[in-house]
Image: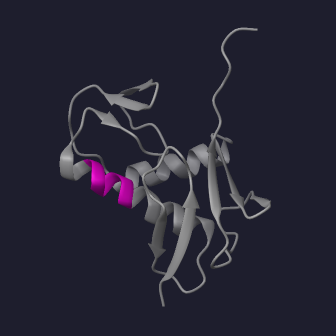
Amino acid sequence: MPVLIEIQDPSSPLAKILVPQDAPTLRDLLRARIHHEVATHNQHLPEVFTGLVQPEESEQILNGFRLTHKRPLDADRQFTQACDAFARNGFLVLAGERQITDLDAPLTPGEPIQFLKLTPLIGG
């Protein structure tokens, strides 16, 4: 039975997402989120992608990533990049009061999930 998970992320238009697994893990949620972001992008093909991770051939701007040319994105490639970014601490994930450090950690239905992007500071 699918599980509805609440996402608290000011950079994402998602408020809740349906994860198809009965006992979802962070990996399942991340896959569902990335596939939703890419599907939304591919429907409209805007110049700026506002998803969780930076697509290839794009530059980071204030509120997203500007693509070098309008094009559909590959959800599986974006998911792989998201997993790599998570492993490199490109973003943190909080479930309730705890930080999730393993993509295969189980999620508790009803527990709010927060994605926190980390931005490197420039200068000293």
Residue 111 percent across, percent down from the top left? 67, 72
Residue range corresponding to the magenta coloring:
36-41
Residue 36 percent across, percent down from the top left? 37, 60
Q: Is residue 40 magenta?
A: yes
Image point (39%, 50%), residue name: 77
Quadrant containing the C terminus is top right
The overriding secondary structure of the stretch rendered in magenta is helix
Q: Is residue 49 magenta?
A: no
Residue 20 percent across, percent down from the top left? 45, 80
In the picture, measured across the screen, residue 118 lies left or right of residue 69, that is right
Q: Residue furthest bottom?
A: 1
Which image quarter: residue 123?
top right
Q: What sort of colour scheme is used for the picture? A: one colour
Q: Residue furthest right?
A: 98
Q: How many marks?
A: 0
Image point (39%, 38%), residue name: 55
User: From the viewer's perspective, is residue 23 above or below residue 32?
Assistant: below
Please state which of residues 61 and 110 is positioned toward the viewer in this rendering: 110
Image point (51%, 77%), residue name: 4
Residue 41 percent across, percent down from the top left? 28, 48
Q: Residue furthest top?
A: 124
Which image quarter: residue 7?
bottom right
In the picture, measured across the screen, residue 28 lies left or right of residue 73, that is right
Image point (65%, 66%), residue name: 112
User: From the viewer's perspective, is residue 20 above or below residue 33?
Assistant: below
